[in-house]
Image: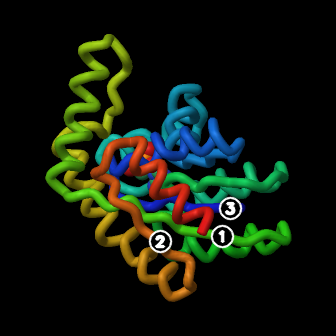
Amino acid sequence: MNIILIGPPGAGKGTQAGILVEERGMVQLSTGDMLREAKTSGTEMGNKVADVMARGELVTDEIVIGLIREKLEAGGTGFIFDGFPRTLPQADALEQLLADMGQKLDAVVELKVEDEILVERVVNRATEAQAAGKPVRADDNADAMKTRLLAYYKQTSPLIGYYYAKGLHDYVDGMADIADVKAEIAAALDD
Ligand code: AMP
């Protein structure tokens, strides 16, 4: 089964993807993580995208589709796409890449969270990381968060209607406790 977790920044996609990896042996493909790794290891691409990411804007479709293509070409199944696709061209590219592997998408689960709570969560994530001496994401601040939310509503949220029309969309209350969100996602996947 291949699924997408979709939702605005701070909705809990990464947390829930981590649980699905632990409990179901699925494979998490987070383009955000891949881009941050490229940045940390100082690759040319990583340096190129660092400013765009820090501002909270989207990097080009070409770059993220390339990252996903590389992972999918290594083979496998049971993918959780986390933070990808974020635009309609990315969604089309994903469909094609999966079709080339003889696979398809089985579900797109939206995590719904109110905007005010998202901003609070992201700002808290930065404060907590700082207090614990952990690295703080360059885009976990109120300014970048505004840009990230705008990017979500302008470029990514149309995907929800797109996947609804394809009969793949489901949603869960992303404001519930982590365990309850997990149970709702399980119900959506196993029905
Ligand atoms: P995330 O960790 O998913 O919140 O992603 C962090 C940042 O990486 C985003 O704000 C974008 O700058 C970039 N990014 C991650 N995934 C994508 C994507 N699918 N398309 C474009 N930009 C992306």
Ranked by sequence position, the earlier of labels 1 and 2 is: 1
Residues 81 and 74: in front is 81
Q: Amino acid at mark 1?
A: Asp
Q: Amino acid at mark 2?
A: Asp
Ranked by sequence position, the earlier of labels 3 and 2 is: 3
Give me the disc on residue 170: 2
Residue beneath label 3, please? 2
Residue at mark 2: C-beta within 8 A of ligand 1:
no
State the image coordinates of residue 87 (x, y, percent, origin top left): 47, 70
Q: How crowded is the residue under tag 2: few (<14 C-alpha within 10 Å), some, or many (20+)?
A: some
State the image coordinates of residue 100 (x, y, percent, origin top left): 82, 71
In this rendering, the answer to whether 157 lies above or below 30 is: below
State the image coordinates of residue 183 (x, y, percent, origin top left): 48, 51
In this rendering, the answer to whether 191 lies above or below 35 is: below
In this rendering, the answer to whether 29 lies above or below 139 is: below
Specify the quadrant of the image occupied by residue 41. top right
Q: Are marks 3 and 1 in contact (CB under 8 Å)?
A: yes
Give me the disc on residue 106: 1
Residues 150 and 179: in front is 179
Q: Are marks 1 and 2 in contact (CB under 8 Å)?
A: no
Residue ID at (39%, 48%): 180
